[in-house]
């Protein structure tokens, strides 16, 4: 049975609306113990999130131990949509997108009509599969079952509904960007 003991959670830092790069933070956990932090940058509303995350993970000393990638939402830096199936294939690891609230997909699709490359980005969201309710959150997944996703969330969501790697990534990214973190991811 897969335990997903080593997991990395990614979140982006708060950012102002501008054309440029946004910091992304990855936090590595072994069970409930913080093991390390990675950081990089993706283009706001861009198309480079999948290759950037792939390289951040591949080049890290943690890659050989990792068993799971967690994302807080399918997009980083606005509408820089992660291709979770390609990320999973590139790394040979399952990818689990975790959302606190069910997304309003019709509103997202409408917003993407106004964004450069929006049709391609909407296709990536659809390719990620349905948004499913599990363990008090919503998920999209690549490379793991819904039952495995539920076990991961129940095991790693200690101080909120979000797994600790995502909660920590949110706090660290916020602290780096603004000088202090906000308590609730």
Image (spheres, helix red, strand yellow):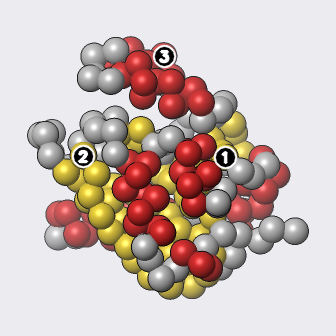
According to the picture, the residue beneath numbered tag 1 turns out to be 142
The answer to whether 58 appears left or right of 89 in the picture is: left
Q: Does residue 184 show up? A: no
According to the picture, the residue beneath numbered tag 3 turns out to be 106
10 Å neighbourhood of mark 3: few (<14), some, or many (≥20)? few
Q: Residue at x 72, y 45 (%)?
A: 134
For the residues bearing labels 3 and 1, Cβ distance under 8 angstroms: no
Q: Quadrant of the N terminus?
A: bottom right
Label 3 or label 2, whichever comes before in sequence order: 2
Q: Residue at x 46, y 43 (%)?
A: 82
Q: Secondary structure at mark 2?
A: strand
Q: Secondary structure at mark 3?
A: helix
Residue 45 placed where, x, y %?
A: 27, 36
Residue 38 vs residue 106, the one in the foreground? 38
Marks 3 and 1, Cα distance to the nearest angstrom? Answer: 22 Å
10 Å neighbourhood of mark 1: few (<14), some, or many (≥20)? many
For the residues bearing labels 3 and 2, Cβ distance under 8 angstroms: no
Task: Point out which mark residue 25 bears.
Answer: none
The answer to whether 63 appears left or right of 54 in the picture is: right
Question: Is 2 rendered above or below residue 99?
Answer: below
Residue 185 vs residue 113, the one in the foreground? 113
């Amino acid at each position: 049975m897969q335990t997903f003991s080593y997991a990395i959670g990614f979140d982006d830092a708060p950012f102002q609306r501008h054309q440029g790069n946004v910091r992304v933070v990855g936090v590595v956990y072994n069970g409930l113990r913080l093991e390390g932090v990675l950081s990089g940058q993706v283009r706001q509303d861009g198309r480079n999130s999948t290759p950037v995350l792939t390289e951040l993970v591949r080049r890290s000393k943690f890659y050989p131990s990792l068993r799971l990638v967690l994302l807080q939402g399918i997009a980083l830096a606005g509408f820089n949509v992660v291709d979770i199936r390609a990320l999973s294939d590139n790394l040979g690891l399952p990818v689990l997108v975790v959302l606190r609230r069910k997304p309003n997909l019709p509103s997202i699709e409408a917003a993407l009509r106004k964004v450069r490359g929006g049709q391609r980005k909407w296709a990536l969201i659809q390719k990620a599969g349905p948004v499913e309710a599990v363990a008090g959150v919503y998920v999209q997944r690549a490379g793991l079952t819904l039952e495995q996703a539920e076990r991961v969330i129940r095991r790693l969501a200690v101080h909120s509904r979000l797994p600790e790697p995502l909660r920590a990534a949110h706090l660290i990214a916020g602290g780096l960007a603004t000088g202090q973190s906000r308590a609730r991811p």
